[in-house]
Image (tube, helix red, strand yellow):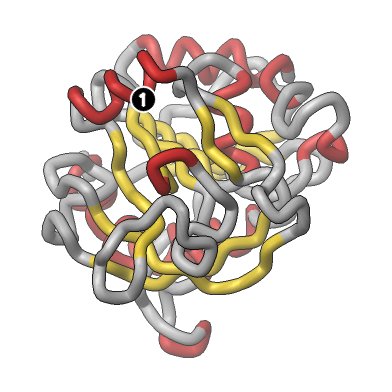
Amino acid sequence: MKAGIVVFPGTNRERDMAIALRTVTGKAPAMIWHRETELPDLDLVVLAGGFSYGDYLRCGAMAAHAPIMTAIRGFAEAGGHILGVCNGFQILTEAGLLPGALLRNAALRFLSQDCHLRVERNDTPFTRNWTTGDVFRTPMAHGDGNYIADADTIRALDDEGRVAFRYARPDGRVDPGDRLSNPNGSINAIAGVLSANLRICGMMPHPEDLVDPLMGGEDGKPLFEGLVEALVR
């Protein structure tokens, strides 16, 4: 699998993401600067976490108009696979590649803690190495992770099975009103969503930070292993 990570001014999780991808592929991903106008030959484009352009205007709003985004839109239109994590998820929504928006956390403070996610379907490249209903631990680190969308969009996401992950209790129960299990207040406890063709995934927590026992566990590793299995050529 050929993977590339886009780096914007303020991106700060590209090294973590590179470690995760190198762990499962055995080779370093390409690093793509935001001012580039073309992508190399890739199977997967990753938008990593951080604070692109200092989160001015809205998180991800400026990055959504960076020169590289024209190529990324073309990559998406051609059926390419894209993973956006944290700020990367924000950028994907601002660019119109995923529906909804990420607002300030319900408690109006930055959250840096572990959370649990429930896998809502396992027939996508991003979730294939889990079973539907599986729960895994993953870190979160964001101030604007409160997912919201209009009622029609939420209904469509549910009807079309485009919710990839939901915030949950360790036993798998989902309670959107419970701030312990859904700490940022996301509507319907949505933690990650998919594009209509299931080839683009955005999520707020950081699975790349749990891919090695030395990091505290390997809970996030199935996501990356599944991508390799699905996209290796």
Local SS, label 1:
helix
* Closer-to-camera residue (82/205): 205
Q: Is residue 108 above or below residue 82?
A: below
The quadrant the N terminus occupies is top left
Q: Is residue 208 above or below residue 5?
A: below
* Closer-to-camera residue (229/188): 188
**What residue is drawn where x is 77% and y is 44%?**
51
Residue 54 percent location from the top left of the image = 87, 39
Residue 185 percent location from the top left of the image = 55, 49
**What residue is drawn where x is 75% and y is 37%?**
8
- Residue denoted by label 1: 154
Decide if residue 75 is on the left or right side of residue 57.
Answer: left
Q: Is residue 127 above or below residue 161?
A: below
State how many labels appear: 1
Q: Tell me which corner region of the image, top left, top right, bottom left or bottom right, holds residue 188.
A: top left
**What residue is drawn where x is 37% and y is 35%?**
193
Residue 118 percent location from the top left of the image = 28, 59
**What residue is drawn where x is 82% and y is 37%?**
55
Mark 1 Cα shell of 10 Å, populated few (<14), some (14-19), many (≥20): some
The quadrant the C terminus occupies is top left
Residue 218 percent location from the top left of the image = 37, 77
Decide if residue 220 is on the left or right side of residue 140.
Answer: left
Name the amino acid type tagged 1: Ile
Q: Tell me which corner region of the image, top left, top right, bottom left or bottom right, holds residue 53.
A: top right
Q: Residue furthest front?
A: 177
